[in-house]
Image (cartoon, grey):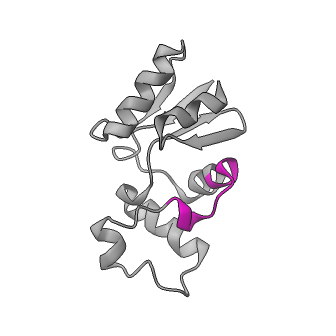
Amino acid sequence: MTRIYHNPRCSKSRQTLELLRANGVEPEIELYLETPLDAETIASLLDKLGIKAAQLVRRSEQDFKDNNLGRADITEEQLIAAMVKYPKLIERPIVVAGDRAVLGRPPENVLELL
């Protein structure tokens, strides 16, 4: 089964969903801004993506700046906790298929999973 962590207001997220559907994939849609992810889910996504929390954080968001999340001594756990508290910080979209995941930036990245 394929799942997309989706923000319908994000053009890249919409394009990624359209690309999946154009390739015959109807993913389970997780609206992560409406139902925020817990720390365990974020850690699992990071593992599947093969990246660190700092690579999944949207640095341009005001919550990132207001909470001084770019400082050198910030830990992985602190960044994950911030993403739990402020889901807008999570880069989107994330598409998961089995034990693998990709960021849909650019949307064509999802073709690796098909």
Q: Quadrant of the C terminus?
A: top right
| Majority secondary structure of magenta residues | helix
What percent of the width, then of the height, locates residue 76? 60, 72
Question: Taking 100 as reference, is 17 left or right?
Answer: left
Residue at the farthest top position: 24
Q: Residue 89, relative to residue 68: is it above or below?
A: above
Residue at the spot 47% in from the left edge and 15% down from the top edge: 22
Task: Assess whether residue 47 is covered by the magenta stretch.
Answer: yes
Q: Quadrant of residue 100?
A: top right
Q: Is residue 87 left or right of residue 109?
A: left
Q: Residue at position x 65%, y 30% from top?
A: 113
Residue 66 vs 86, above or below: the answer is below
Number of numbered discs visible in the structure rendering = 0
Is residue 53 positioned above or below 45 on the image?
A: below
Q: Nearest the camera: 87 or 93?
A: 93
* Image position, residue 19 (x, y; %): 46, 23
Q: Quadrant of residue 63?
A: bottom left
Whether 105 is among the magenta residues is: no
* Stretch of the chain drawn in magenta: 46-56
Could you tell me residue 53's position as x and y percent?
57, 64
**Closer to the camera, 85 or 51?**
51
User: Residue drawn 51% across and 23% down?
Assistant: 27
Looking at the rendering, which quadrant does residue 74 occupy? bottom right
Residue 39 position, x and y percent, is: 56, 59
Determine whether 3 is above or below 86 in the image: above
Q: For this view, does 45 lie left or right of residue 13?
A: right
